[in-house]
Amino acid sequence: MPVINAIRSILFNVIFYLFGLIFLSLVAMPTLLFKTEKQMRWAVGAFCRSSLFIARWVMGIKAEYRGLENLPTEGGFILAAAHQSNMDPIMTYPVRGDVTALAKKELFAMPLVGPALRKINIVRIDRQSHNAHKDMKRVGEQVQAQERPLIVYPQATRVPIGQNKRLKSGAFHLHEDTSLPVVTVATNTGLFWGKGFWHRSGTAVFEVHPAFPNGLPKDEFMSRLQKEVVERSHELIAEAGYSHLLPKSDDTKS
């Protein structure tokens, strides 16, 4: 790792986590006292924009958005995105401040975290259930009623650069049950804002693609999801000059 990236990583982690602790304590948590979600959503948006500012000017990570014209400006839809880094949701929120997400039920039982999730209408799911996909209809109906985007990560977890993971079919079941539009996002954020302590400077891309046609059979839907979420993300990684970090094969893990 270049010395400058190592120095920047240390500064970035100190500043980012200190800022997060202060912001959470003095700004975000007090918004729980308000009756509506407006104040907390403003706080989340302010945190995300501030985090991107810190990433840009301390770590040298620029945020580039592509294809925002493909992002619906209103109504409910499914935003199926690649997930490589903590930067992914931070880049998402500024473009749709009403976005919601899925969170495992255990988080709702945690002090402060649970009330915050409920305040901004995050959707509760049971990841341990073997029939979790059957609950997608309820999730879809909730998203439709709220008329806001739902971000889902088909890879289910952060996938470090150089690894593959089989896509989950939750987005397909949501779409099948509700006919909500599906819009995909590719990214290369994991190159720069890594999962660990060390990061590197560069341009993190958030690329939005046109909505899927309605009524795609499952095999075709999943194939398109693989191409636009995973394979296009690999192309963005190669575009940034890091093709040597890509997996040797696009075969996914079970």
Image (cartoon, rainbow, N blue to C red):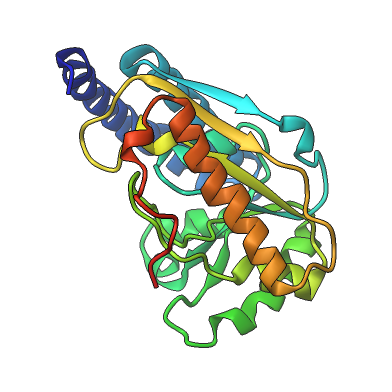
Left or right placement of residue 114 versus residue 2 in this view: right
Asked whether residue 67 is in view, the answer is yes
Q: Nearer the viewer, residue 37 or 9?
A: 9
Identify which residue is drawn at 44% across, 55% down.
Answer: 250
Residue 115, position as x, y percentages in the image: 48, 59
Left or right placement of residue 181 versus residue 186 in this view: right
Identify which residue is drawn at 42% across, 81% down.
Answer: 128
Residue 141, position as x, y percentages in the image: 76, 70
Left or right placement of residue 129 versus residue 244 in this view: right
> Which quadrant: the N terminus?
top left
Left or right placement of residue 2 versus residue 124 in this view: left
Residue placed furthest toward the bottom: 130
Identify which residue is drawn at 54% across, 87% down.
Answer: 131
Q: Quadrant of residue 243?
A: top left
Identify which residue is drawn at 79% across, 67% down.
Answer: 216
The mark tally for this picture is 0
Residue 31, position as x, y percentages in the image: 52, 42
Residue 97, position as x, y percentages in the image: 65, 38
Asked whether residue 42 is in view, the answer is no
> Which quadrant: the C terminus?
bottom left
**Image: 37 above or below 190:** below
**Image: 201 above or below 43:** above
**Image: 73 above or below 54:** below
Residue placed furthest toward the front: 248
Q: Nearer the viewer, residue 160 or 180?
A: 160
**Image: 225 above or below 1:** below
